[in-house]
Image (cartoon, rainbow, N blue to C red):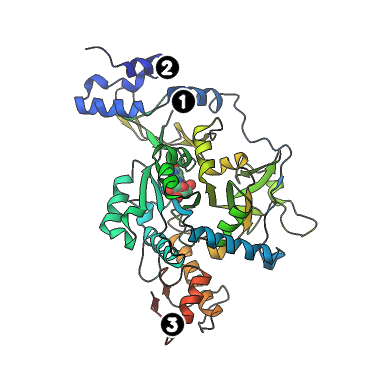
Amino acid sequence: MAKPLLIQEFERAGQGHVFSFYNELAPEAQKTLLDEAAEIDLAEIDRLTRTLLAKDAATGIDLTGLAPAPYERRPENGGYARAWHDAKTAGEAALRAGRVAAFTVAGGQGTRLGYDGPKGTFPVTPIKQKTLFQVFAEKVRAAGVRYGKPIHWFIMTSNMNHAATEAFFKEHNYFGLASSHVHFFRQGRMPAVTPEGKILLETKGTIAMSPDGHGGSLRALDRSGALDLMEKEGIDILSYFQVDNPLVRGIDPTFIGWHVLRGSEMSSKMVAKAYAGEKVGHFCTQNGKNVVIEYSDLPKDYQEQIDPATGALRYIAGSIAIHILDTKFIRRMARGDNSLPFHRADKKIPTVDAAGNPVKPEKTNGVKFEMFVFDALPFAGNPVVIETRREDDFSPVKNAEGLDSPKTCRDDQLRQFARWFKANGAAIATDETGLPPFAVEVSPLFGYDEDSFADAWARLTPKPSINAGLYLE
Ligand code: UTP
């Protein structure tokens, strides 16, 4: 039988070894391997091998002309209160007009948390143990009710967790959202390669493929038809957040309003870095463009520079992976010449040896390629960065223990609930960090941000006393 054309193409590209065990495979397994291989853009792998993997590939980034990016300060930090007020009004109008959709990137592997299952199915709330997906779903649902327009929610998965994610939503009846308003699509995949650029097999009949990074969301939104759907629905504002951060105000009228009033194609939230070496990306400018420089790429002396005018860190603006994207901009990025760059990550990648026996490497043996969504920033017109308070927007669950863990996230949720109670005149004891000595929980369906909570609390009669185990819905 003639050799499939695809195998011949792989051979011509110096990747014929991918099919070393092809003849040993059953027909269905052969088809699976061919399907996986067909996903691979050989020219792209070749280009990445010649650039990112080349022996003389530039390490580190060019820092010429780098400066801190300007950002909009919150009113209490010297920002112009009127502008923040106007932004909120404009954002509320956009929400009432149905122009806004929520977008969660949930295609990651969540290796640091070490949880078996899609990360969005991880329980996070203090009393009800609601999962990340349920928290977001209730926020989206409540915001839709508040603004009189149900909000569409797009969720990017990966091959590894797509079916489990969809099944989870079905099983939970979409947490009260209309299933017609919840849209799942898969992101693309990239093969892992050896440091010499040879594609790695995971088993004799499968390629070591992994998700192409959260930056893969831009082309996946296009390829999946999600952008077409948005166009049909009159949605032009996409509110982007990560699956691991239940504190995020995924629907924030003020942020939306800044984006709209500035005619921005991609907007971002920043928090003031807690300390010089904090591991967050930094909002900077370079050649008149906004860029995010990762902590690992910004030299220590830059990270430690002090702004003489304020006495604070000069590179103070930390990125917390919260953005708003204009849908036309996404289309342009997905289809135009300005595709996002790939980054290399050296990893231990389970593979097979020349005889096809499984190998569990002890040292890094391969390279994964990933795109990062913030690399779209330099291509965006009128990008705006606004300041947010960490406690209102950011407490991710990244690690099983320690920093950014289920414990820190739970405590941050409790602090937030306690702040809301206090701001509305309800007594609740807390320690000096604002943490109450017992668990309470506020459902997003009761209040999902300061304003919605205040309104719901004002309507509530009689007011409950704030005791251990109080749950408001
Ligand atoms: P992280 O960078 O925290 O990666 O992703 P991760 O894969 O979830 O976790 P680790 O590093 O293996 O522990 C940040 C966000 O980007 C999404 C994740 O789901 C998370 O919401 N993401 C990441 C994707 O959607 N696709 C990817 O390919 C990578």
Amino acid type, callout 1? Ile
Q: Work out how far the residue at label 3 is from the one at label 2, CA to CA, in angstroms.
A: 68 Å
Q: Is residue 176 left or right of residue 51?
A: left
Label 2 C-beta lies within 8 Å of the nearest ligand 1 atom: no
Question: Could you say where residue 417 lies in the image, as x and y percent from the top left?
Answer: 48, 73
Frontmost of labels 3 and 2 is 3
Nearest the camera: 241 or 320? 241
Asked if the residue at tag 3 contacts the one at tag 1, i.e. Cβ–Cβ closer than 8 Å, the answer is: no
> If you read the primary sequence from the N terminus, does the residue marked by circle 1 or circle 3 appear first?
1
Frontmost of labels 1 and 3 is 3
Say above or below: 362 vs 324.
above
**Which residue was labeled with disc 2?**
13
Q: Secondary structure at mark 3?
A: loop
Q: Secondary structure at mark 1?
A: helix
Q: Residue at x 54, y 65 (%)?
A: 392
Say above or below: 290 vs 427.
above
**Which residue was labeled with disc 1?**
45
Q: Secondary structure at mark 2?
A: loop
Q: Residue at x 63, y 63 (%)?
A: 86
Crowding at dot 3, Cα within 10 Å, few <14 / some 14-19 / many 20+, comes out as few
> If you read the primary sequence from the N terminus, does the residue marked by circle 3 or circle 2 appear first?
2
View extreme (bottom): residue: 462
- Do we see residue 11 in this rendering? yes
> If you read the primary sequence from the N terminus, does the residue marked by circle 1 or circle 2 appear first?
2
Amino acid type, callout 3? Leu
Amino acid type, callout 2? Ala
Nearest the camera: 146 or 199? 146
- Name the mark on residue 323: none
**Which residue was labeled with disc 3?**
460
Question: Could you say where residue 98 lies in the image, as x and y percent from the top left?
Answer: 46, 56
Nearest the camera: 181 or 372? 181
Asked if the residue at tag 2 contacts the one at tag 1, i.e. Cβ–Cβ closer than 8 Å, the answer is: yes
